[in-house]
Amino acid sequence: MHQEHLEPGERYDAVARTTRALLAVPKGEVEELARRCAVRGVAGVRGLVRLRDLMMPVWAEFAYELVFAERCPREARDLIAANADDVVTSLKCTGLRHMGRRDRLTRYLLPRLDRVRVPLPGGLTSLEQAYYLQGAFFNTAVVQLSEAMAHLLLVLAQHPGEQERARTSDDRHFDRVINETLRLYPLFGIAHRITSGDIALDEHTTIPAGSVLCFNYPEFHRTGFADPGRFDPARFDPGRCDRPAKELNHVPFGVAANRPCPAWRLAPIAMRAVAREVLGRYVLDSSVTHTRSLPSRGPCLLTPRGAAHRPRLALAYLRVRDRWEDVWRGLVQLVLGTYMVWDAHRKRLCERHFAEAASNPPDASDAEDRYAHPGHQPGARRSL
């Protein structure tokens, strides 16, 4: 469950308030939390890594401590990272979905709901509260931050001059690097919205309520920029930009007027802190193909600063291996993507869900019993 799964109304407003409360952390605390998680996650790592894999445990710990205001146990970190990796891998059709990983995380969260540092929405059952935390913080946040960091570090690995400048630059320049990375590699591809009312385009054309409108983030981010495929953080330098920032075709966190990502403020602060920790410890190099979907998970060579840095042979090997992986990965995506579409048509999950919900509103008590730990009494927690 995610707040974006909810229609406008009191239920959505209650969940959105909780999300904002959990994200309302002072800048200094966000930076320190992100830095601590990065230190634990990257210390001692060296050689060839997959950047998304490297970042998953970092953001799993970050999200847990953001929610519970306590050090993330190893068990929780592993459960969160395993489920988040499973979700994004299946979305890219490079692996199958393992629902048992989601269920194990749900069972872990249920008896800990009363330890969340802000009151959870009272209109949700305990199971729905667990699904909310899991969907918003331990799935979406971890996946998106890991993907964003993989893009950021990979683009710096492939632009050595900009990597060194970013390492020693002030926050304003680093923010421009993040903005340009998210312009080139937006986390969303094609997004959609369902219209809640008629939209008149002109006197002859009206989009009726209930229409599905699609929005192409990558294409929008390329429009209005000279040489849009080139990495150039200076595009966002106020001294060189001929338009105010709010007028640029740049909405990496969604449109402000229509349910933008609630972490639009927190995410860049945390990303900058983690990236500074990585760049302060390592020189990054990579020769792989960099695409928006990043199914390769971002292979990259990490060399500790001060160690001998001779990456030519390693980069040649990495280039050849990446091209070969593209071949078999493409076949896997073809097979799994075809199966996913066929299975969705066969099960008609959305059609069945709305039909069943209209005729028989679900009782969550049975589902809660199914997830309860031994000795855990659903409904016995404090009223939220």
Image: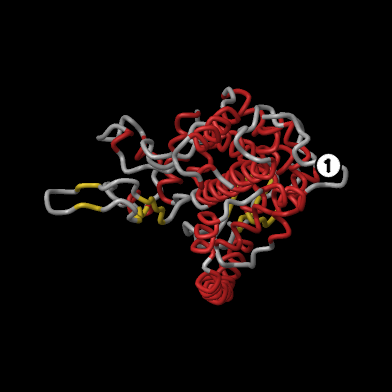
The amino acid sitting under disc 1 is His
Report x, y in % for residue 307: 70, 46
Quarter occupied by the C terminus: top right
**Residue 65 can be seen, yes or no:** yes
Report x, y in % for residue 184: 41, 50
Q: Secondary structure at mark 1?
A: loop
Q: Quadrant of residue 316?
A: bottom right
**Residue 168 can be seen, yes or no:** no
Report x, y in % for residue 371: 76, 50
Q: Left or right: where does residue 314 sit relative to residue 371? A: left
Among all residues in the image, which is located at the extreme left? 203
Report x, y in % for residue 195: 34, 49
Residue wearing tag 1: 376
Decide which of 207, 338 is in the foreground and name it.
Answer: 207
State whether residue 287 is above or below residue 241.
below
Q: How many marks?
A: 1
Decide which of 306, 93 is in the foreground and name it.
Answer: 93
Q: Left or right: where does residue 255 sit relative to residue 321? A: left
